[in-house]
Amino acid sequence: MSHNSFGHLFRVTTWGESHGPAIGGVVDGCPPRIPLAEADIQPFLDRRRPGRSKFVTQRQEPDQVRILSGVFEGLTTGTPISLLIENQDQRSRDYGEIRDRFRPGHADLTYHLKYGVRDYRGGGRASARETAVRVAAGAIARKVLGEGVTIRGALVAMGGDAVDRANWDWAAVEENAFFCPDRAAAARWEERLLAARKAGSSLGAVVEIVAEGVPVGLGAPVYGKLDAEIAAALMSINAVKGVEIGEGFAAAALSGEENADEMRMGPDGRVRFLSNRAGGILGGISTGQPIVARFAVKPTSSILAPRRAVDRFGEEVEVVTRGRHDPCVGIRAVPVGEAMLACVLADHLLRHRAQNPDAPAEARLPRN
Amino acid sequence: MSHNSFGHLFRVTTWGESHGPAIGGVVDGCPPRIPLAEADIQPFLDRRRPGRSKFVTQRQEPDQVRILSGVFEGLTTGTPISLLIENQDQRSRDYGEIRDRFRPGHADLTYHLKYGVRDYRGGGRASARETAVRVAAGAIARKVLGEGVTIRGALVAMGGDAVDRANWDWAAVEENAFFCPDRAAAARWEERLLAARKAGSSLGAVVEIVAEGVPVGLGAPVYGKLDAEIAAALMSINAVKGVEIGEGFAAAALSGEENADEMRMGPDGRVRFLSNRAGGILGGISTGQPIVARFAVKPTSSILAPRRAVDRFGEEVEVVTRGRHDPCVGIRAVPVGEAMLACVLADHLLRHRAQNPDAPAEARLPRN
Amino acid sequence: MSHNSFGHLFRVTTWGESHGPAIGGVVDGCPPRIPLAEADIQPFLDRRRPGRSKFVTQRQEPDQVRILSGVFEGLTTGTPISLLIENQDQRSRDYGEIRDRFRPGHADLTYHLKYGVRDYRGGGRASARETAVRVAAGAIARKVLGEGVTIRGALVAMGGDAVDRANWDWAAVEENAFFCPDRAAAARWEERLLAARKAGSSLGAVVEIVAEGVPVGLGAPVYGKLDAEIAAALMSINAVKGVEIGEGFAAAALSGEENADEMRMGPDGRVRFLSNRAGGILGGISTGQPIVARFAVKPTSSILAPRRAVDRFGEEVEVVTRGRHDPCVGIRAVPVGEAMLACVLADHLLRHRAQNPDAPAEARLPRN
Amino acid sequence: MSHNSFGHLFRVTTWGESHGPAIGGVVDGCPPRIPLAEADIQPFLDRRRPGRSKFVTQRQEPDQVRILSGVFEGLTTGTPISLLIENQDQRSRDYGEIRDRFRPGHADLTYHLKYGVRDYRGGGRASARETAVRVAAGAIARKVLGEGVTIRGALVAMGGDAVDRANWDWAAVEENAFFCPDRAAAARWEERLLAARKAGSSLGAVVEIVAEGVPVGLGAPVYGKLDAEIAAALMSINAVKGVEIGEGFAAAALSGEENADEMRMGPDGRVRFLSNRAGGILGGISTGQPIVARFAVKPTSSILAPRRAVDRFGEEVEVVTRGRHDPCVGIRAVPVGEAMLACVLADHLLRHRAQNPDAPAEARLPRN
């Protein structure tokens, strides 16, 4: 990953600030002859879009993506795909009062000290708005991976209240405003988030992304491990403070017998794992089991409660962030996390077949 | 990060298998005129070395590093530094019985499926032995960072039993075999780990790395975020399943008021944070506060308890891993985690001064 | 260099096809606080613009560049700078007849075989139109290099007729339609090129780029040599078939005494070279002398004379390229070559100061 | 290309100085299951070895390569291949007198100014000795390309005296000390080079490398063009001052009709080019025709004739380079050029199949 790009062969570069004329990105290295239209991307953007429910920011952005290059007569051409999303509901005036102030929990201070100048409007480059481009790139990555690969995300905890995995239903995820797979939890969260917002506060969340149908063999020793690159991709999402794969931190409390997934042979010559504590990755390489990644999203730092801060003149100030903000940024991070995982997998798919064009896609073992 | 390299300007490439003639690496991009000798690196290798206590593998490797290039008359020259560590205590015969078998929790199966061939002896390229080169590179990275930056690690949990932070004493870390900062916990762990080993089992652990004195401004939006690259670097260590920065996953259970670190002015024009839940990084850029990262290490998969597995002929087998193994690989991961953080910081220091040569090293604000 | 990007720290990515809605690019890694406006870029685009004289294509493109990000209140912010140039005079109908045909000397066949699909209109991605974005990026690179560095280009041969270096006058370059530094040669070329165009033919050319005021020390051993990266940058320009530095191919006919530039001390402690056959680079690193690079541009392949070719159905055909084409593409390659050299130097300036922040900018030697 | 590495997927990193304990490198990304032994590499090193004839340096280096990793039971494993060549005939005392002096035409001055310290012995990192590792890597690259691809080089001019292409015989190349394909030229050169050496002088040369059997489709728009990366690879060889592809600089003197290679259909559905002025590359992508690249090597700067120079104290001095030097470094550059072309092609082969796994290897067109 370099400054504003990630991926090696399926390479995504993004640009743009929250309140500039537009945001966008370039996807380089996409294989040719993949059917692609703006309509393939838009549904994913719509899932992430602000103003979608009362639980997310009321900023109204249609987030219409335009493809400016790399597609001809409905097919990708193998050349760079330029994506552009215009910024419409900018309301720069909302941000005047924080022009010189460094909001707690924000990138204001660090950008100021690093660059000596910053576009303070709406967070500028550090705005979560940048993640819309990730989601667009992720839609293309899904096309590269093909229909055999399914990538889905869900919110598994909000404000410390976790879902009950016994209640997990992927269908529920699309029914509530939280991408919550547990209907009972969703009901509790609704109350909870309304209360937090009413109190001028905000809540954190944990997001889980699951990729099924991933070919075996993606990833590479030792610094190009699939899990290492997933970790970077997820940690690069705004407000993320932790990433785990499979059992994650809980693995540290298990014994060796409990943790290592045992194997048996399936009826069709395929290796069958008796559990998936590894989260689908061993030695940095995919096993063919579902890849399971989770990430922790801190509570929104833009809150109404007054907070102690400083300004760029070295004066102590109090900051109250009005504007229109997500009371739980973790919600809209779900489609972003899916997109990042899709991009990492697409990149590794290309890297894998470059080096190992004859490798099997499934964990099948030939009986002599 | 590419396959066997990481870093952009301070770039580390490693090579070698557990049971080949040697392991080694190349550090490219190191600034010139830094005093460097093998003796500067050796103490860090000694901390990671096997056979150091009864709680780590009894494999006897002196792990003597040789510098083959890039240093002239005691100074780095700005050209690549080649590092070589000979493998001595190889005992390849120990591994014959697992030549065709895929041990649960190991990279055996995935390497086999990806590459169709693998050096099965001692884990080959996937062996934790590779991390010795990281430690050597980390020693050079510390030199690049200079004496103002201190990077220290500790084991903060073993087998689910966490240290009491009230007891934290960095001096304790060097006194026990666990790099444990809490003497009471160290005493408990000793019993616990002996019991686990006796039972043919193993334990997981959580490691915390703290970097103090880090200049403000390291890191970059949005995919080159300092925390994203730390996450990749730590997740690339063998057996790591989770990474977190600052408050990490616990941040997801906090409210916005609790989580965002408030700021006041210090007496000398420096910004003073009232807490450090962010772990020293905001918007992917260092704040000047201590950088705090933690990672979860799964319990050693090489255990004496028999486990169900398969072999490369598609036969179901039972695996018992004899050999000499760490009952808790998390212990020796402490110096490795320190080294990885040092390398990431050194790389970002160079990247930062390339773009921002006049940026301040400290979070000082000029009062008008 | 990766597919559609080049540079490491000052990194340029371009996108777009000749007849899509727009072309553009992203400049990542630009230092902050550099004054930058569209008006700083436009003059360079105007020099490269089609329709500027009767000797270049009559396609009418205003080539107005828009900056969509990375600049705030007139200053670069250190975040990616997105550049966009709309395509206006597209006339796709001109290209219908070559939709299925592979023009000799063009990328038609190779794109078809590599990708299985291509935007045939106007050369698509392989169009020289892409170079407009390079020129825009080069304008930013010049800002990074600062006013002390001057980068100028000239056409030094056309159709095998070279300038007389005794007549060299940089002022002449801006006076004629050929960027020719020799007024006498320019007069000859005018006749010659009109004759070639009348005959439905085209001419090749040689371009020379000179960078003065370049700090000493840019470049790096051994694959990051300054001349190696200049060679790649210039060879990546459409229609370029050769690159040389300093004496270039002529050096191969000299003796060792003739070729190696001798040194004396100047009055101010600066090293003074008695010649500059090296073209300002020794061991891949700049010496502080002018950097001199030349590149050969083949004659335009789009000509009126009928040529034997094949089509995608495997039929033998004759191709006559009507449309609006440059009779000598070398002419408009001059500002492109300048831009590429500017980008390479800006990138190396950042890389150099990352590793060697205290290195001197001039070749001064302290007398003891 | 970064400092001491090149290639993206087939990535070569080298290290080492002329008079250190060893030189070596790491080849990362090599596909697995390729038979490889030191004996496969050694013949290529032997062709480049010093002391092979009276026309090259008399330094006696057996240049025995050792493979330290990445090969198991005779097959590559897909993990990094570490290569090591010990330095034996070091004679550091020969270089004492130039410790403080900057030899004309050498990297002495620029390394001193850039790094402030340098290993002056035998050129240190800037020594042509580094190219031995390139040759070793090239031997592996040839294995990746397979037996269908033939890469051969020849010296086509020495001291301004060119071969007669009518006399070209590849068999002759292996018969004389110059890799000269024209026996008559070889005889002339023998006299000429002896005279030059006797006079304490040296000669330049032009090397041509031809790759046959290269699949169609290697390369990528627009900065990853195959010719751009070949240019960088060849220009990175010590003493190279110019690179050209196909007709090269001569193309600039041709008309459009003369230059663009016409096409007809062969009897087997294959495209047949009527000439190969393009040198096997169109639009940066291989056509399937032979790839032809040439590079100019300046005359050895280490000569007996006294030259004016300066030392690091700012004193004017005269330099006479005794030691053992090649009177024409172009000769030993032939196997190096072959190796660099092999590495670039291997890298692009992997990159191509990553993005275009189903692309045809030959320029065949289906007749409807």
Image: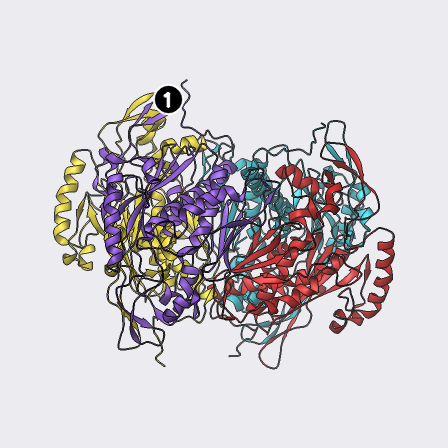
Chain colours: A yellow, B purple, C cyan, D red
Q: Is residue A187 left or right of residue D84?
A: left
Q: Is residue C226 left or right of residue A329?
A: right
Nearer to me, B305 or A271: B305
Percent of width and height locating residue A228: 38, 53
B49 lies above or below C276? below
- Whether residue D263 can be seen here: yes
How many tags in the picture? 1
The local crowd at label 1, few if under 14, some if 14 to 19, many if 20 or more residues have their Cα within 10 Å, is: many
The residue furthest top is B368
Percent of width and height locating residue D62: 68, 61
Question: Residue shown at 41%/35% (left/top)?
Answer: B150
Q: Quadrant of the C terminus of chain B?
A: top left
Nearer to me, D332 or B170: B170
Nearer to me, A301 or C324: A301
Q: Is residue C332 left or right of residue A212?
A: right
Residue C242, image quadrant: bottom right
Q: Is residue C343 left or right of residue A155?
A: right
- Whether residue C45 can be seen here: no
Percent of width and height locating residue D192: 86, 59
The chain carrying label 1 is A
Question: Residue shown at 77%/55% (left/top)?
Answer: D326
Percent of width and height locating residue D296: 73, 56
Identify the element where label 1 is drawn: loop
D308 lies above or below C122? above
Residue type indicated by callout 1 = Gly
The residue wearing badge 1 is A314
